[in-house]
Image (cartoon, rainbow, N blue to C red):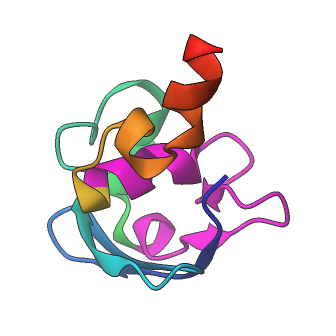
Amino acid sequence: MFEPLEVKALSGYRIWIRYADGEEGEVDLSHLAGKGVLKLWEDEQKWKNVRIAEDGAIRWSDEVELCPDATYLKLTGKSPEGAVPKLTSTARA
């Protein structure tokens, strides 16, 4: 739903991301670091390898990617219903 256009790795397991609707800023992912496949992030070079995949995912490797919708909600502090008002009206219909 939310199209990321640019992403950069920052220190402290944070990323800066810019979306097509103009929203941009930092997202703190430190609460995920070191868990399961996210141990990959402990290698600084692999952490810096973040990119936007063809399908829009925020990706570090074939095994490690994040949903751009989830990072959009974290960035903006919006709920799914607040970010996409049609969700609320469709649910009531």
Q: Which of 26 and 85 is in front in this view?
A: 85
Residue 5 place in picture, x, y as percent: 62, 82
Lateral position of residue 79 relative to residue 89, left or right: left
Q: Which residue is pictured at 59% across the width and 44% down the height?
A: 64
Question: Which quadrant holds residue 43?
Answer: bottom left
Q: Which residue is pictured at 67% across the width and 71% down the height?
A: 52
Q: Is residue 10 above or below residue 78?
A: below
Magenta region, residue range: 45-74
Identity of the residue furthest to the right in this view: 54
Lateral position of residue 44 relative to residue 45, left or right: left
Q: Which residue is pictured at 57% across the width and 45% down the height?
A: 67
Q: Is residue 7 above or below residue 69?
A: below
Q: In this view, does 48 lie above or below 53?
A: below
Question: Does the stretch in magenta take in 93?
Answer: no
Residue 63 place in picture, x, y as percent: 67, 40
Question: Which quadrant holds residue 36?
Answer: top left
Q: Which residue is pictured at 60% across the width and 60% down the height?
A: 2
Identity of the residue furthest to the front in this view: 93
Question: Which quadrant holds residue 27?
Answer: bottom left
Residue 7 place in picture, x, y as percent: 49, 79
Number of marks present in the image shown: 0
Q: Is residue 68 above or below residue 24?
A: above
Question: Does the stretch in magenta take in 55?
Answer: yes
Lateral position of residue 53 relative to residue 32, left or right: right
Identity of the residue furthest to the top in this view: 92
Q: In which quarter of the image is the C terminus?
A: top right
Residue 39 place in picture, x, y as percent: 38, 39
